[in-house]
């Protein structure tokens, strides 16, 4: 098959590209504007197996159209997007343009070029600030109600995909709503973790990335954003999923769409950890120590987000391999040490 990965030089896209290059014989094309994606990552991927790289911004509608017309891709896996929640509050139009408008055009080009499968990276931010977390976590039928433009830009793209598939029987989609993605390539050399790719996004805002930067000494200290939430220890609770397990779901999605209908799946482990628990795990799993301060709440942060992942487990037979917060922290730390 011919597969186009947009945002394939980025964090999650590169882990999906890695698995496709390593475990399948599909012909891979990566499209990336390299605004946050890294050329070093592309070089590493090239050492696994060759692929085509196209440096292009999705806002260049005509060029995207030509690329799709020329290549006749079977599958598009679409990651390219802006993802910083506070930035989306300050600059919503950037998010609606980069995420919703560019995705709409990509879908238009895809249907024009008769691409049959479209796999889309969405987010738990589409659920907004859940008023009450069901006992087994948030399932896919939980009402969506984004509280920031980032979440809304993704939810609008979801809807556009659904409407398009409704009108075009040859076009199928799979939407993944990611919970908190973390960690780096589980690659072992002489039995030791040695990630080849990881999160290189500059000016990180993600908890595990920041904690790993502290653990390796790139940052002197970090802040916990609020310790007065209604949670076990007052700090925010999230469902952290290892990026390789998430990538695996995308590979499964390609075969799944051969036989099954378009659908939406949560991607998480269905377990919550507080910020304090994550920080303690980073310290204990890596044998490091660093300074942590309590700061005020960060705008737009819900108290608790935990997935109900029974749908993806039962319908897609997805079985996570790295459901271990210590391993997630260690892989992030080993990547940061490189
Ligand atoms: C958010 C989005 C998620 C999106 C991701 C992309 C929501 C609800 N979630 O995840 O969908 O995919 O961004 O960027 O909008 N924290 C600290 N100190 C830090 C950093 C974080 O205490 O230095 C805390 C946060 O307050 C939060 C938790 O750690 O409670 C996780 O934060 P983060 O890693 O930034 O991810 P989310 O905001 O949950």
Image (cartoon, grey):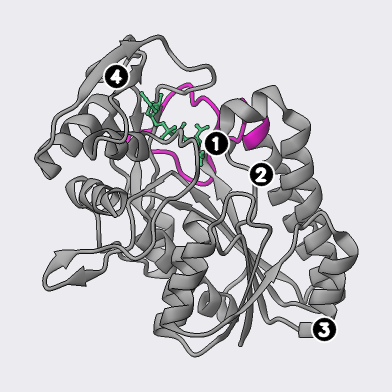
Residue 42 position, x and y percent, is 52, 69
Q: Which mark is residue 125?
A: 1
Callout 1: CB less than 8 Å from ligand 1? yes
Mark 4 Cβ inside 8 Å of ligand 1: no
Callout 3 secondary element = helix
Determine which of the numbered discs, if any, sits on residue 154 in the image: 2
Badge 2 vs badge 1, beta-carbon distance below 8 Å: yes
Label 3 belongs to which residue? 70
Q: Is residue 262 left or right of residue 237?
A: right
Q: Which residue is mark 4?
A: 231
Residue drawn where x is 47% and y is 17% of the image: 298
Task: Judge whether residue 299 can be spotted in this image.
Answer: yes
The one nearer the camera, 289 or 164, is 289
Mark toward the start of the polypeptide (1 vs 4): 1
Q: CA distance from mark 1 to mark 4?
A: 19 Å
Q: Which mark is residue 112?
A: none
**Quadrant hosting residue 186:** bottom left
Task: Give x and y (percent) for residue 201.
Answer: 49, 46
Point 31% across, 48% down: residue:
336
Please identify the quarter of the rendering in which residue 96 is found.
Answer: top right
Query: Is the residue marked by circle 1 packed among few (<14), some (14-19), or many (20+) residues within 10 Å?
Result: many
Tag 1's secondary structure?
Answer: helix
- On the rendered structure, is 262 left or right of 335? right
How far is the residue under mark 2 from the one under mark 1?
8 Å
First in sequence: mark 2 or mark 3?
3
Residue segment shown in magenta: 128-150
- Mark 1 or mark 3, which has the lower sequence index? 3
């Amino acid at each position: 098959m011919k597969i186009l990965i947009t945002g394939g030089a980025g964090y999650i896209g590169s882990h999906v590209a890695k698995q496709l290059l390593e475990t399948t014989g599909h012909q891979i094309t990566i499209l990336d504007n390299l605004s946050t994606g890294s050329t070093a990552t592309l070089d590493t991927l090239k050492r696994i197996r060759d692929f085509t790289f196209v440096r292009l911004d999705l806002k260049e509608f005509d060029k995207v159209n030509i690329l799709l017309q020329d290549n006749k891709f079977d599958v598009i896996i679409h990651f390219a997007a802006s993802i910083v929640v506070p930035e989306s509050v300050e600059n919503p139009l950037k998010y609606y343009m980069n995420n919703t408008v560019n995705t709409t055009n990509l879908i238009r080009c895809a249907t024009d070029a008769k691409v049959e499968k479209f796999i889309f990276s969405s987010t738990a931010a589409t659920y907004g600030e859940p008023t009450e977390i069901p006992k087994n976590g948030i399932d896919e039928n939980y009402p969506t109600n984004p509280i920031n433009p980032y979440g809304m830009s993704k939810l609008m793209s979801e809807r556009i995909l659904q409407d398009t598939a409704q009108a075009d029987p040859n076009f199928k989609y799979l939407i993944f709503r990611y919970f908190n993605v973390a960690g780096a390539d589980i690659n072992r050399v002489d039995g030791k973790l040695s990630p080849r790719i990881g999160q290189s996004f500059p000016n990180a805002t993600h908890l595990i990335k920041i904690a790993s930067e502290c653990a390796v000494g790139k940052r002197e200290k970090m802040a916990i954003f609020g310790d007065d939430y209604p949670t076990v220890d007052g700090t925010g609770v999230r469902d952290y999923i290892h990026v390789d397990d998430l990538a695996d779901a995308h590979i499964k999605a390609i075969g799944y769409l051969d036989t099954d209908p378009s659908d939406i799946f949560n991607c998480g482990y269905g377990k919550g950890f507080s910020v304090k628990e994550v920080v303690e795990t980073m310290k204990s799993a890596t044998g490091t120590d660093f300074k942590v301060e309590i700061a005020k709440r960060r705008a737009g942060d819900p108290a608790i987000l935990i997935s109900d992942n029974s749908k993806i487990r039962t319908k897609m037979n997805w079985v996570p391999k790295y459901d271990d917060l210590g391993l997630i922290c260690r892989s992030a730390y080993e990547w940061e040490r490189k």
